[in-house]
Image (cartoon, coloured by chain):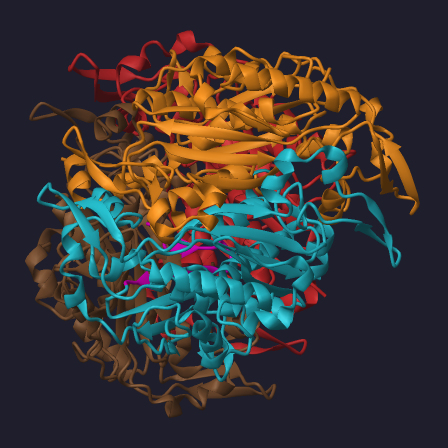
Chain colours: A brown, B red, C cyan, D orange
Amino acid sequence: MSGSIYGKHFSIATWGESHGKGIGVVVDGCPAGLSLCEEDIQKFLDRRKPGQSKFTTQRSESDSVQILSGVFEGKTTGTPISMIVFNETQRSQDYSEIANYYRPGHADLTYDLKYGFRDYRGGGRSSGRETIGRVAAGAIAIKILNQLGIDLFAYTKSIGPVSCNEQNFNREEISNNKLYMPDAEAAQKASDYLAKCMEDRNSSGGIVECIVKHMPAGVGEPAFEKLSANLAKAIFSIGAVKGFEIGDGFDVAKATGLTNNDNYGFVDGNIEKLTNHSGGILGGISDGSDIILRAAFKPTPSIANTQQTVNKQGETININIKGRHDPIIVPRAVVVVEAMTALCILDMLFESMTSKMEDIEKFFQ
Amino acid sequence: MSGSIYGKHFSIATWGESHGKGIGVVVDGCPAGLSLCEEDIQKFLDRRKPGQSKFTTQRSESDSVQILSGVFEGKTTGTPISMIVFNETQRSQDYSEIANYYRPGHADLTYDLKYGFRDYRGGGRSSGRETIGRVAAGAIAIKILNQLGIDLFAYTKSIGPVSCNEQNFNREEISNNKLYMPDAEAAQKASDYLAKCMEDRNSSGGIVECIVKHMPAGVGEPAFEKLSANLAKAIFSIGAVKGFEIGDGFDVAKATGLTNNDNYGFVDGNIEKLTNHSGGILGGISDGSDIILRAAFKPTPSIANTQQTVNKQGETININIKGRHDPIIVPRAVVVVEAMTALCILDMLFESMTSKMEDIEKFFQ
Amino acid sequence: MSGSIYGKHFSIATWGESHGKGIGVVVDGCPAGLSLCEEDIQKFLDRRKPGQSKFTTQRSESDSVQILSGVFEGKTTGTPISMIVFNETQRSQDYSEIANYYRPGHADLTYDLKYGFRDYRGGGRSSGRETIGRVAAGAIAIKILNQLGIDLFAYTKSIGPVSCNEQNFNREEISNNKLYMPDAEAAQKASDYLAKCMEDRNSSGGIVECIVKHMPAGVGEPAFEKLSANLAKAIFSIGAVKGFEIGDGFDVAKATGLTNNDNYGFVDGNIEKLTNHSGGILGGISDGSDIILRAAFKPTPSIANTQQTVNKQGETININIKGRHDPIIVPRAVVVVEAMTALCILDMLFESMTSKMEDIEKFFQ
Amino acid sequence: MSGSIYGKHFSIATWGESHGKGIGVVVDGCPAGLSLCEEDIQKFLDRRKPGQSKFTTQRSESDSVQILSGVFEGKTTGTPISMIVFNETQRSQDYSEIANYYRPGHADLTYDLKYGFRDYRGGGRSSGRETIGRVAAGAIAIKILNQLGIDLFAYTKSIGPVSCNEQNFNREEISNNKLYMPDAEAAQKASDYLAKCMEDRNSSGGIVECIVKHMPAGVGEPAFEKLSANLAKAIFSIGAVKGFEIGDGFDVAKATGLTNNDNYGFVDGNIEKLTNHSGGILGGISDGSDIILRAAFKPTPSIANTQQTVNKQGETININIKGRHDPIIVPRAVVVVEAMTALCILDMLFESMTSKMEDIEKFFQ
């Protein structure tokens, strides 16, 4: 595989380039009997499509999904579900210039070094549009998880220097503002900060947090297939992610055992952790409390400000990247983090079904 | 798989529990013709074995490795290499007490929830001794990487509040102090801090950093099999890791495009990044500069201080964990981080061999 | 995965049902820099499409392929190649009757037992149309193999009681007759036999043979990933295959060591087997001589003759399957056997690239 | 992987050479809570060990298995089960001669071509002793299958020209004769035939048949992961197998639809096939009737008769292979076929657990 297939049980194969004919995904391993229609997918795609706010690219795409297979009479059949979004704006002429040099912070040079050449139109396969396939497949995974009682949502935790205040956390607020922040006040400040970035022909990084509620305990495999390890890979596979943490994350490095360990007690007769420093995972296995994870996204590399690079003629040149680019990746990445988290959790959930002889004997009775 | 197999090309299967008969690993996919003897492995195992300093468990183990297969007349044959370390100290009687309750911060509860019961002797499979198999296999991976000109090393970046100072970085110093810090001054301060932790019957977290030098460009696959994503999984599969980052890591969240992008220029006629905020990976593919990664380790959960937990009789109890445990995981984890980094890099290196038709045609000429 | 993904290095994900919107495949892992256009694919699809002779279904499909991604300026980019064939004839009304009962010899019952219901239109996913994705992907694999000097072709070895005579073997003849037999005389006899089958409202089985010439030695992995084992799986994954053999195949059961062993000698200074009972594979590894494999295909299960089955009302009924179905699967399966052989061989070829340290060191020099 | 890892859910990694320190296997993915002791494994190993009859090698090995991990207080813990059999007879001096030439019918040449050199002692990894790991792991798989109500057994179907007569089939007889034939009369004839082979310093091929009773319907995945395809690979991964078939196998090539289709009817109110030409698999999915498969084994390549080969000095030579070798592989392969069938069936059984939403919702309730 060249890397566009994900998942052992609920497997997806994504394809497509920014300025090719379209973007799509094949989902192989979706259980039969799930109600599914295009609207189930579309509502997630709409959250990542361009043009939702002043902080997004001007590219005009409806990102309308079509289901081509695997669904019959409104239900999944157990066979592969192929979904496609045709690209509507493919103005490759815009990209003649960048074909000739390497944009700093982009994958231009690494693609050339790896493959000998590249589809330079809008970043080709390394474009953010690649995530359409992830979100479409993730929408199905989320639907299944919801049906199993698992609730999962992500949001913007911080943008540049502006962080949400935990005291102000309001889940409803997330979809109220264009930045997907659960804290209206922070959203306003972040909005101002981004406006300033745009004025400066610059861009900003930020952090996405994702929470999984009502997660069954016992999911995740020891050693190499820890739930945490698979989440790390899933999230780190999103372009622009440079850091990942679970629970207290990097703060544990300065903590002590006494402050970091979660003590146990009884809550309503059930054994429960009294705190959740672990972020819902102990020894790589879900412990039944909320899973909490965070990803750090780098600033959009395409900026209009002057940067130095080299071209194919062997010259050092100064460039100013044209076109209006998102000054931040984070808000549109929120739904991608949800998708990848769901794809990972669902896959590990399926994996966990053979942990115990008792469960297997009951299943095949 | 239940999670003890790692790697697509250079695959390893680890096995063994803290207080079982031994710990081992089978390496499947090691190329034929590599010179290999037990000493090549032992020198890495010696770096993680107990008893190297006052900051380690009192358990007495020589951790002597035996190669049981796959090597003939001093060279690997291309068939599986089975390696074993017999456990010498298996005093299971010490563990009768902890069988009955759940130690905070450990995997006791999650194993019980997942499997219905657990091997409670010394943590069973969730013990740090599980890493012996990783280090033994990693030693072979490192030997291969070195032979290909790739240099790789890890060290302790911080312990609790004490961080190494970049100005004081001295690679030779790493093996000079018991904490594997490249900064002698920081090592002294950290040593004092750990002594205090032990006095307080407490433990400390810390950060390990790993650097890969002379990494070929073009390694890593787009989308889900990014080099960064696979490194994230490899490192996060080590018990106690709660955070992972590459290059500037979480700092990118506060950075701007202008400060975070690495500009290009020519150095000795070659295209090179003038800075390395990316940590050697762009678009998930190695860019030819040093790979830099960091992992945050939580404090050792076994502490002598009083903690609250529950037992199998359904009582809330206070416990003080007995025995002398490492007050910090980090120094002994340094070689484990090296091993996992090497296993990941080697696997992705092999994966990258089919990127270009040109290379393949040359190979099969 | 639910089974529609094949290949570890050159991976394909197929999708689509007989009467859905289309059939397609995503190829993940195709090396960059291969010249590729739709005509390269179409010529293979044309060999399996309906309507080539009187022995095929009346369904009218042009089976025109479109490449949607992964090719830029006439060359593969190394990223996923998505190909699609839209279904043109989707007269689902024809299938209302078979929705209600289980056709003998078909997968109707097993799909219902596995998934709870099925897409009954033309067999849904279990239709022979599913092989379109295999052939499209196989066309690329064959192009790569050819470029590496490997030559591969299949043909009809026997139809019912009519077998090709080895003395009459003529490679050019294969594409001269509608039955893809390398023996014109046998083709004529088989044609008569099939005409009789149709008259009898019956169908026939047959055997396909495939030969791989100029196969490099050393391909195939010991133990579970033998080249022979992977070929067995690849070919047995084609619907209707009930037997598979390599070299002398089932005849070895009656042979002795003395007659079955291939002695060695020197031919033009090279070590060569003097016979090829092994069919080009020894110990699961290619030995440099021609690979010879055979697959037995069962008769088309859809026959107009009277058969007994049961319906969903719990009644035993007699049925006569309507419509004109191919009286034999074999001729249209020839190109599918080629495709699966090529997909398998290419994947194992890539796998073999890391067998020797010497080769790896040379590669990364 | 280099090929010594098998299975997606119940995964095994085998290792070891004929004349190395030992042979072993790591089972990763065995569910927790299965009662398991060494005797469960040993009884299967005893069926393949040498010295059971006059038709086996003189090598003296007790093949005593030790369980090193994964079992605690008599039950599997869900973590890897490592098993080892130490080699007792390692007289490598016997093999100095064969190091220098290529034995016809063996993997000597292909190993040298693939790896550059080989462990020539007794065939190294390509020895039949490699199957010890398969049988040990298979014993666990069989125990699980039995616990789920699935019954599975193999036997010798034919030896050279001597076939069992179906009318004489007697399951108890299988373990009554040294050739594992279910027909005492055929066993006697086969015994005479083998005695003659030995006298002639020659060897014989034969066929093993395996039957799986009480197989649940719905197991096997469409397209590439058909149950039949996976069985084909599993069985073809056994050294010396040159042919594989399911149900009527190669006979289908001469059959017609009318004779080959299995009609449906009701038996005790259940839908059942009235015949079993399909061998229990339709469309790659188990149909609930007995699975019937057959494998053709080639004659033992090591024969004392004169054969021509070449040596490393570039000479054509005549050889007579020394030592007493099994004149037939089949009887000792019977338990290996059982093991591989069980490993495959169990893995596919686990895979099938996520076919239906309904089952998954029930599981996670």
Which quadrant is the C terminus of chain D positioned in? top left
Residue A217, image quadrant: top left
The residue nearer to you, when weighing D290 against D18, is D290
The residue nearer to you, when weighing C229 against C168, is C168
Whether residue D72 is visible? yes
Q: Position of residue C3 (x, y in %)?
A: 36, 51
Where is D104 relative to D114, above or below?
above
Q: Which residues are magenta?
A: C2-17
Q: Residue at x 24, y 27 (%)?
A: A359
Check if residue C89 falls in the magenta segment: no
Check if residue C15 falls in the magenta segment: yes
Q: Position of residue C186 (x, y in %)?
A: 56, 63
Left or right, residue B116 beside residue D294 = left
Q: Position of residue C1 (x, y in %)?
A: 34, 50
Where is C51 relative to B327, above or below?
below
Where is A355 relative to B343, above or below?
above
Q: Residue at x 16, y 76 (%)?
A: A52
Q: Residue at x 70, y 44 (%)?
A: B32
> Furthest residue to the top?
B93
Q: Position of residue D306 (x, y in %)?
A: 86, 33
The residue nearer to you, when weighing A138 against A295, is A138
Left or right, residue C312 beside residue A86 = left
How many numbered marks have been drawn onto this rendered protein structure?
0
Left or right, residue A283 beside residue B185 = left
